[in-house]
Structure formats: C-alpha cells, structure tokens
Amino acid sequence: MAIRYLPVGQSALIGGDWCETIRLHFGRTLLVVGDVMGHGLEAAVDMTAYRSSLRYMASAELPPHRVLRQLDDLAAREPDRRPATCLIAQIDPNRGQVTITSAGHLPPAVIDGQGRTSLLPISVGPPLGTGLGGYEPVTYRLDPSQTLVLFTDGLVERRGQDIDQSLRRLAGVGFEAGSGVEDVLDTVLARLDARHAEDDVAVLGARLHHRSVQHTACTPEPSASHREGRGLRPPTRQGPSEESP
C-alpha cells in the first residue's frame, strides 16, 4: 500500500483532499479518498471533520454504502459543512475481492500484471452533505497481480479538457509489467504531470498479498441495482456479497 499527496502549487500542506486507510476485522481494510469542495484552511477543517466521522462510523464494521449514507446524513444536518466527494473501497483479501461505493467521486483505476490500466465501472451517488443518499456498492474480484488506485480529481482534471478525455489519459498510461505499488504511483504522477496540477492531488494504491486461492481478475459481482455493471472481463452472474438494508 502507498499514498501520495501533492498540494496545489506545492505551497502548503493544507487542503480538502485526503486519503485514509482503516483496518477492520478479519483482515479487511477500508481504502478512502475524499475531496472537500474549495481550498485553504476552511476546506481543511471540514476535511478533518469528515475523516473523524468516517473513522467512527467505520468502527461499526458497516459496509461502504452505509458508511457513506451516515456521513451524508450527518453532514446534511450541519449547514456550514462544505460538500465533499468520497470513494470507499473495502478490500477483503480472504475472498480476493473489493467492494466500492462512490459519493460523487471519480472511479478507481486498476493496473493489471501486464501494466495495462482500466477504470472500474461504479455506481456514483450524490456528494456528501446533500442529504440525498442513494449509494450503491459494486464488488469486483481482485487478483494479487493487480494494483488498485484511488485518486482525487486533481490528478486528471485539466483546464479546458473534458473529464472523460482526462480519464482516458489516465487509462492510456502504461506501466512496466510487475511494477510495485510505489512505482505505479510515481509513474502515474509523472505521466500526468501531477506536480503542475491546478488542484490538490491525493492518490492511494493497494495490492493484495499473494494467496494460494486463485480468483478471476476483476470480475464484478453486481448488486441488484447494478446488474449491468461491466468489468475488465465478462461478468460472472452471482448474488451480491453484501446486502443493502
């Protein structure tokens, strides 16, 4: 696992972007990236509030979509709290899978063992603080040869460029086969010229440890509301690994 944070302009380590890793029971880990709207001290204060609330809610071992729902409800009751986007990925190494939920956040990328990059299709709900809820999980098989990369929009967004075009730039980045997580993050930051980005950049990369059980790489296990989700390979029609309440 590795994290990179580049504040806009390299001027100060204050902003609204953050990365978080939270250990859960049974070897599971929550990976989190978030982005509070705005910049400066005010955004940093709200970012700290979101992080503290997330850690508390995650301690109840809730699935990612329920964590986002509770965060959204809490932020909506505080009129001065700035909205934020957030992406949560719960990695379960024992099952060889990752469950992802988004609150207005860009999708994660996955780099396979051959160095090819793809974006994982996800269901995107409203940003935190709107009080609208509606967060849906999607689960993928994750192979130990793959690197999962979560990031904030500062990594890809550029002035005058459509966001879809920006994401295609990321998907076009190639890596040396077998690159380690640290090398993956350094390469993607360099190829996308993140040090000259116009917004803060936060990137988190993770990879499963090798296990004896073999899994199909990144095959989605769609929830009832996401049965047409597409993966890197044709989906295996299985029931959801976690049920919404």
Image (cartoon, rainbow, N blue to C red):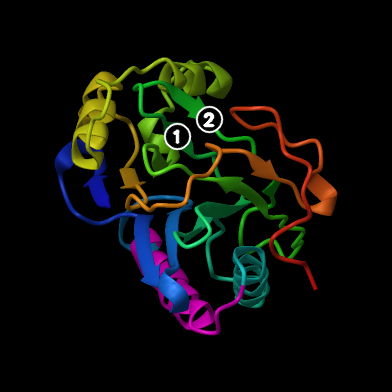
Residue 17, image x, y percentages: 37, 52
Disc 1 residue type? Val
Is residue 102 visible in the rendered image? The answer is yes
Q: Quadrant of residue 68?
A: bottom right
Q: Is residue 61 left or right of residue 243?
A: left
Q: Is residue 104 visible?
A: no
**Which amino acid type corresponds to the residue marked 2 in the rendered image?**
Leu
Q: Quadrant of residue 62?
A: bottom right
Q: Residue 173's x, y, as percent?
A: 36, 18
Residue linked to disc 1:
110
Q: Which mark is residue 67?
A: none
**Residue at the extreme front:** 212
Residue 57 x %, y %: 53, 80
Mark 1 secondary-structure assignment: strand
Q: Residue at x 42, y 58 (%)?
A: 31
Which region of the structure is painted magenta? 43-62
Residue 46 magenta-drawn? yes
Q: Earlier in the sequence, mark 2 or mark 1?
A: 1
In 3D space, how far apart are the residues under numbered discs 2 and 1 (Cα atoms)?
6 Å
| Label 2 element class | strand
Is residue 175 highlighted in magenta? Answer: no
Residue, disc 2? 119
Query: Which residue is farthest right?
Result: 224
Q: Is mark 2 in CB contact (under 8 Å) with mark 1? A: yes
Residue at the spot 16% in from the left edge and 41% down from the top edge: 10
